[in-house]
Image: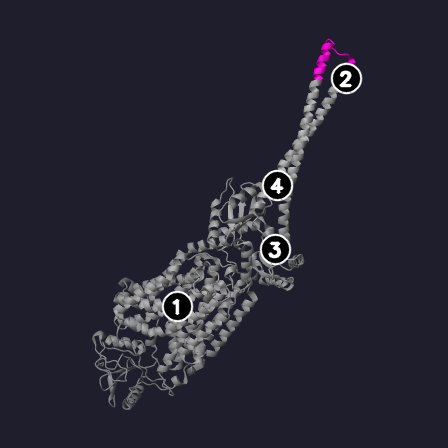
């Protein structure tokens, strides 16, 4: 890989304009693809297959007329007085006009709705009165009928007695005339009885009808009582909530359609009235780049300027990152036409693209600048920087890609897509770092250095390499203090609650927040987050049974704790599905509302086999959180497992990857604690724009795990690889820790500050979701880079000593040699040095003028033998007694390609003397090598392997090699 990147770097340097133009063309293609194929982004967080999603789908199927998206408009008077009749009329006319807009199905006039509710209550009341009056009339009629019946009965009794008496007097048979008279009276009584029976039947029938009407009226009254807490106009008549219904599903309503509604209503709102819009209407797409993000980028630019010293050098990583963001984000957005993409997905791509794009380019640029200052030829330096630091960038970026792409295994589409978009942006940043950065470095040439620095090219710069390890007491103290601090910061995480943002999390001056607070104040917090309950009957009900079932089921729902009101939405065409709107007592993110969702689900099935389903923002939060928690173990196992394999390959150790992972868990816990304290508890709320603390974004923990794990392993790689290199080249284990930290801390600190600045810029976004993500990433990098990687890991490595690098022998034998730092590349490509203003090859010279002439002569002799002189080793101090291994280790950090040894046991060979100002390693001269005397210096030339050893008069040597 290092050799490939070396060649790629040199190719990009030689074909700089072609590479630059190619990336411009790629940027143009990605922008064109976005313009041609980009679709609409969604602000709704949904997961297919969850209980909430199933209920929503059932509602759309059973109630197609009610499946369109909705939004609320809150009208209120400016002076706080009640609406006038003219204002009510004007608002009604405005809503009628709004209903005619394209994409709008209908609007609901709140004043007419409230009047309808009042009319229904009056009708029920009047109906009860009428029934009571009718029942009274029927009772009076029944009394009269009973009196008539009694009279008729008495008359029948008298007639029967008279007939019997007459028959007795007549001796049994009455005369015809008398009998006719009695028959006429009997006929009259019979006719009267028939009339009375008919009247009785009428009264009985009317009583039955009254009973039936009374039952329906009573059921209607009960339903009205259940829904009495639902209003569309406030009790003080100062605020009204109007709904707009679209002709498409909520996710399919375009921003243009929503904006047309807002513009129409704002333009024609009547005098003395103001209007606010709910989240469903006014929630716009988040800005990809705003003022806060610009400030973060400026801080990153200042950091680069301080570190690199020139505006040109500081601009290069920024240019590379911006091009990468342009390519990655627009290419990702071009997919939004065929997949459902959450609105914050491209913002995450911008965050990652800027942060890693700047850092990865900086790593290569920093290495190139050091090599230029050491006198390495321009294109060779670009190639070496690309093959060494670029190689480390590729490996570091691979851990980030693994963590991001693994989000797809969660089974949550929007989360997997976020990971994929982030991975695309990171991959583009890696490609730009190893292609565009070398091309720009070639075009800029030595201008990447300041004028002062260009005048010192080739001048030795002794590196103050640490010669003593960290104190053990200090290591223990650092470890204990760090663990205590992280533990304290992590405590709030024990109280973390997950949810999705609502209107209360929007900016205070936003219309969404004003709408939310007005509804909460005038109608109750629960109106901002109503629940939809669907009751599926085992058998279709008759029209007469529907009302009875609505009351029965509605009453069982209303009997649950924290229910303010229940209103029937309607019944399906076949009367097999009933829908209810349930208003909780508290808002959608309240603990009580979440418990209410669980209680309602636990009710199912009701008596009679009725199945209940619940939908709404609170139920959606519960389902999203459960889905994420179920997927988290698999995700963690995959990410940590793959990353452990990568780190074992890189570090050839078991304990180092384990400590790296444990350190990440500590920084993650602290990050969760910080997020909870600020966004849920409200600590430092004014600083971070948190005015209404609430639950943490439900998918934020998963996103943070993926991104922060990848970035944490980046810092682990850049710091600990230096420790491993020092140990592998002879430094004692504990001293190697200190030297590795010394070698990598500057660039890691700068990289961390840049990432914190970029991520931190998003903390002040107008989107609540982006604010929490920006803070989580910034705080996570702060904790992981400065506390875990630069304090705890070195302390642990020191305490572990040599055991930190233990690995089973069988595993060591089968593992491939992963040369992250490109040491093999440096050995195979010795640097070709140039002095300021010169293009010849020179060796590192002593400070004295006489020695300078002598080494120049040695260089001439070496060149005559076909050998290029080069810098040898850098040692800690001129008079220090070092073992051969320690001296070699010191050399390997800067110029490992120039370290040669012929001693069979270099570990035991001592450096006898080091001449001040001359960087050398002493070893016995090789027998049989041609020796050329040049003044006080002797050059031993080996024509077979193309090497030459310049021997100072005091016994030291400078090793040089022939160029390839």
Whether pointer 4 and pointer 2 mark residues with C-beta atoms closer than 8 Å, the reply is no
Distance Cα–Cα, label 3 vs label 1: 52 Å
Whether pointer 3 and pointer 1 mark residues with C-beta atoms closer than 8 Å, the reply is no
Q: x%, y% of residue 310?
A: 43, 81
Distance Cα–Cα, label 4 vs label 1: 67 Å
In the picture of the structure, the residue carrying the numbered disc 4 is: 217
Q: Residues within 10 Å of mark 2 (few under 14, many from 20)?
A: few
Q: Is residue 819 visible in this depiction of the protein?
A: no
For discs 2 and 1, the disc positioned in front in the rendered view: 2
Q: Of label 4 and label 1, which has the lower sequence position?
A: 4
Distance Cα–Cα, label 2 vs label 1: 120 Å
Left or right: 329 in relation to 640? right
For discs 4 and 2, the disc positioned in front in the rendered view: 2
Q: What's the magenta region?
A: 159-184
Q: Of label 4 and label 2, which has the lower sequence position?
A: 2
For discs 2 and 3, the disc positioned in front in the rendered view: 3
For discs 3 and 4, the disc positioned in front in the rendered view: 3
Quarter placement of the C terminus: bottom left
In the picture of the structure, the residue carrying the numbered disc 3 is: 237
For discs 4 and 1, the disc positioned in front in the rendered view: 4
For discs 3 and 1, the disc positioned in front in the rendered view: 3
Whether pointer 4 and pointer 1 mark residues with C-beta atoms closer than 8 Å, the reply is no
126 versus 483 height, above or below: above
In the picture of the structure, the residue carrying the numbered disc 1 is: 782
The chief SS type of the magenta part is helix
In the picture of the structure, the residue carrying the numbered disc 2 is: 181
Q: Who is closer to the viewer here, 463 or 829?
A: 463
Would residue 182 be counted in the magenta stretch? Answer: yes
Whether pointer 2 and pointer 3 mark residues with C-beta atoms closer than 8 Å, the reply is no
Secondary structure beneath label 4: helix
Q: Of label 2 and label 3, which has the lower sequence position?
A: 2
């Amino acid at each position: 890989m290092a050799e490939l990147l070396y060649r790629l770097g040199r190719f990009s340097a030689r074909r700089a304009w072609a590479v630059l133009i190619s990336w411009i063309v790629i940027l143009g293609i990605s922008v064109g693809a976005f313009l041609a194929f980009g679709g609409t982004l969604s602000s709704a967080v949904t997961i297919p297959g969850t209980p909430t999603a199933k209920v929503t789908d059932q509602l759309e199927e059973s109630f197609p007329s009610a499946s369109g998206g909705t939004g609320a408009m809150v009208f209120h008077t400016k002076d706080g007085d009640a609406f006038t009749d003219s204002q009510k009329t004007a608002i009604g006319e405005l809503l009628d006009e709004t209903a005619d807009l394209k994409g709008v199905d209908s609007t609901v006039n709140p004043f007419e709705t409230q009047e309808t509710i009042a009319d229904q209550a009056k009708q029920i009341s009047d109906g009860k009165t009428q029934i009571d009056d009718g029942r009274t009339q029927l009772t009076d009629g029944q009394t009269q009928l009973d009196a008539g019946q009694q009279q008729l009965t008495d008359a029948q009794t008298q007639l029967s007695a008279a007939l019997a008496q007459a028959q007795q007097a007549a001796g049994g048979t009455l005369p015809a005339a008398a009998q006719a008279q009695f028959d006429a009276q009997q006929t009259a009584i019979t006719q009267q009885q028939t009339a009375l029976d008919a009247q009785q039947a009428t009264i009985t029938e009317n009583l039955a009808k009254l009973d039936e009407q009374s039952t329906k009226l009573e059921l209607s009254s009960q339903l009205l009582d259940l829904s009495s807490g639902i209003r569309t106009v406030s009790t003080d008549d100062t605020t009204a909530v109007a709904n707009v219904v679209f002709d498409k599903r909520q996710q399919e309503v375009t921003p243009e359609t929503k904006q047309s509604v807002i513009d129409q209503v704002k333009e024609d709102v009547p005098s003395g009235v103001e209007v606010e819009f709910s989240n469903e209407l006014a929630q716009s797409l988040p800005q990809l780049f705003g003022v806060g993000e610009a400030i973060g980028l400026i801080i990153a630019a200042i950091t680069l300027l301080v570190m690199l010293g020139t505006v040109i050098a500081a601009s290069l990583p920024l240019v590379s990152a911006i091009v990468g963001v342009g390519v990655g984000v627009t290419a990702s957005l071009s997919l939004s036409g065929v997949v459902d993409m959450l609105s914050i997905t491209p913002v995450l791509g911008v965050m990652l693209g800027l942060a890693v794009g700047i850092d990865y380019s900086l790593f290569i640029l920093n290495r190139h600048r050091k090599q230029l200052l050491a006198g390495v030829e321009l294109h060779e330096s670009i190639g070496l920087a690309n093959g060494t630091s670029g190689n480390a960038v590729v490996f570091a970026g691979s851990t980030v890609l693994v963590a991001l792409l693994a989000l797809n295994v969660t089974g949550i589409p929007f989360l997997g897509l976020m990971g994929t978009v982030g991975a695309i942006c990171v991959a583009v940043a890696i490609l730009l770092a190893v292609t565009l950065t070398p091309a720009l470095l070639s075009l800029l040439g030595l201008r990447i250095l300041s004028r002062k620095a260009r005048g010192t090219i080739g001048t030795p710069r002794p590196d103050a390499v640490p010669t003593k390890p960290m104190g053990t007491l200090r290591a223990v103290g650092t470890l204990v203090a760090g663990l205590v601090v992280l533990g304290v910061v992590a405590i709030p995480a024990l109280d973390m609650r997950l949810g999705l943002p609502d209107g209360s999390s929007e900016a205070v001056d936003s219309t969404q927040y004003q709408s939310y607070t007005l509804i909460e104040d005038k109608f109750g917090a629960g109106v901002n987050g109503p629940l939809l309950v669907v009751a599926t009957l085992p058998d279709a009900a008759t029209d007469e049974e529907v009302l009875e079932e609505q009351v029965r089921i509605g009453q069982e729902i209303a009997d649950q704790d924290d229910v303010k009101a229940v209103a029937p939405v309607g019944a399906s065409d076949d009367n097999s599905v009933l829908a209810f709107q349930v208003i909780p007592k508290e808002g959608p993110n309240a603990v009580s509302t979440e418990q209410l969702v669980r209680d309602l689900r636990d009710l199912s099935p009701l008596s009679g086999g009725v199945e209940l389903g619940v939908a709404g923002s609170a139920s959606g939060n519960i389902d999203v959180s459960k889905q994420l928690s179920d997927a988290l173990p698999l995700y963690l196992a995959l990410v940590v497992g793959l990353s452990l394999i990568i780190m074992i390959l890189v570090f050839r150790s078991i304990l180092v990857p384990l400590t790296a992972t444990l350190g990440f868990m500590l920084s993650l816990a602290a990050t969760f604690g910080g997020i909870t304290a600020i966004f849920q508890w409200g600590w430092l709320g004014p600083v971070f724009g948190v005015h209404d603390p609430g639950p943490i974004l439900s998918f934020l923990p998963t996103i943070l795990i993926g991104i922060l794990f990848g970035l944490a392993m980046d810092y682990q790689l850049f710091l600990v690889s230096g420790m491993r290199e020092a140990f592998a080249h002879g430094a004692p284990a504990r001293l190697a820790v200190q030297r590795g930290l010394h070698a990598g801390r500057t660039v890691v600190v700068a990289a961390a500050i840049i990432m914190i600045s970029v991520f931190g810029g998003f903390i002040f976004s107008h989107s609540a979701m982006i604010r929490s993500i920006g803070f989580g990433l910034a705080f996570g990098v702060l904790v992981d880079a400065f506390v875990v990687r630069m304090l705890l890991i070195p302390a642990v490595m020191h305490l572990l000593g040599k055991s930190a690098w233990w690995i089973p022998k069988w595993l060591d034998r089968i593992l491939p040699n992963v040369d992250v730092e490109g040491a093999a590349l440096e050995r195979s490509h010795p640097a070709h040095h140039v002095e300021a203003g010169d293009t010849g090859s020179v060796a590192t010279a002593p400070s004295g003028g006489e020695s300078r002439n002598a080494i120049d002569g040695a260089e001439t002799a070496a060149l005559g033998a076909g050998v290029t002189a080069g810098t040898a080793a850098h040692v800690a101090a001129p008079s220090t007694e070092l073992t051969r291994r320690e001296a070699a280790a010191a050399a390997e950090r800067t110029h490992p390609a120039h370290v040669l040894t012929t001693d069979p046991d270099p570990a035991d060979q001592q450096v006898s003397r080091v001449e001040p100002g001359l960087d050398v390693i002493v070893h016995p001269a090789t027998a049989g090598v041609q020796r050329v005397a040049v003044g006080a210096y002797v050059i031993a030339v080996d024509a077979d392997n193309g090497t030459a050893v310049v021997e100072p008069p005091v016994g030291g040597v400078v090793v040089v090699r022939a160029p390839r």
